[in-house]
Amino acid sequence: MLSTISVAVYLDSPEAIMYGGPREANGTAIAGRVVVTGKNAAQMASLIVTLRGQRARRFHTQQSAASATRVQASLVADGQNNSEHVAVSDRAHAWRFALRIPGDMAETVYTRSSFVAYEVVAEARAIGAFAAVQSRAVPVAIKRTPPADSAWAAAAGAAVEENAAWRSQLELTLTTPSRIMHDTQTVGVSCVVRPLAKGLRLGRVAVQLSERITHNGAWHAQPYTTTRVVAEEVDPEPDTGGLGQTLVHETAASYTLHVPPAYTGIQYDIHRGSIRAHHELALTVSISDAQGRVHNLRLATPVFVLPLTRTRRASLPRYEDAAADRLVSAPAPRRDSDFWAQFVLIDTAPSPAPGRAEPALDACPLALHGYRPSDIAQAPPPSYPGAQEEIERTVVPPLRPEPSHEASSSFVTPMYTEAMYSESLPDIERSAMPLEAYVVV
């Protein structure tokens, strides 16, 4: 007997959110209902619901990086209901389901070359000798975020102020209300450009939100990194004949960055798995010195793009409770070293002639060698998988005397190793510093 049915899947939520890192999250459940419509909808031979990774489409260049792990629930087996069902109408019946997913499941992410995506598939077969299997798939996004009441969230949610001096001639300051950003959010950013010497001219000023994607999937011979600007606000260079505006007093400006929507415009922060995503907020300034040389400076600080969640109010401990004091003074748990990032000040001035002396580097309190915070509130936020007990900081060489002659010279700035800068390191020894490299700019 030929029996025709149709299947529909309705999820309680189009997303599943896990709180905490892959090693500490308890997992979550994807719940919903399957509605089968047909003459004999109540008499099903089998009904199976499966969570699986989406496959790559034919003739598309994107590769699927999702694991082969599947989560399955059998609602009807051999004509017997394993889950309670409800008669919606004479021809429609609904079954509830809940798929429990582990806490270390990779998050949803999309890049140009690969993706990790999931779908919930319902497969139904009616009773009958010639009954075909009917299926329906709906996408679901798996997201990860730190717990709202964690020490990490408290530290990352604090206001950010980064400042650094360049060759004792210019000081840059970048401030923003929080290191945590959400997709489709509007973020306020303020900056200050303060001259410390005469003869400087100010050109283009901009704030950028950049995204760095690292791929290390099995189909790549070596890991590679791509970087792009996902949001930018520019204060155009004043119309002064290309020389820039004379910089006499400090200049302050405020900008509004619009964070793009998730997946189509920006990816959430991901720090484990075959595809990883990191983000930076940067202030870029173009100036010309007294000799007319143009310098492009960049002051950057790490930020975290996380999904916006609705959390319940947490019960806070009493102030006199000793546990509250221990929470603040306790050493931070271990973390992933590749998650740590620090601001970088880059100068793109021309390199000096061989044999010429380099100018002294300015000491910065945020980059002192051996710096250790006295408590977690004084340290930049660690990764939500945890944080190291000993905080690694960028090493700044000791101050050296200023050269007596005026010369165009470059200086060495410690920064994160990225693919876009790897070509500038032919003669630099990098084996001793796996996470950092000295880049001549």
Image: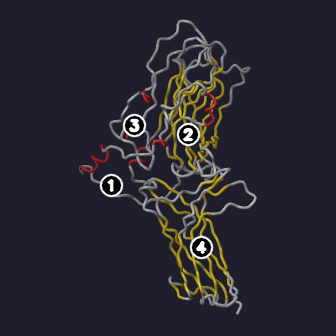
Q: Secondary structure at mark 2?
A: strand
Residue at (54, 57) in percent of width and height: 107
Q: Secondary structure at mark 1?
A: loop
Nearest-to-viewer mark from 1 and 4: 4
Instruction: Tell me the residue that label 3 is attached to.
Output: 391
In x, y percent, where is residue 274? 57, 51
User: Residue 10: which numbered mark, if any?
Assistant: 4
Instruction: Tell me the residue that label 2 is attached to.
Output: 280
* CA gap, disc 2 and disc 4: 37 Å
Instruction: Tell me the residue that label 1 is attached to.
Output: 316
* CA gap, disc 3 and disc 2: 19 Å
Residue at (47, 40) in percent of width and height: 340
Instruction: Quadrant for the C terminus, please.
Output: top right
* CA gap, disc 2 and disc 1: 32 Å
**Do tag 4 and tag 3 residues touch (Cβ < 8 Å)?**
no
**Do tag 2 and tag 4 residues touch (Cβ < 8 Å)?**
no
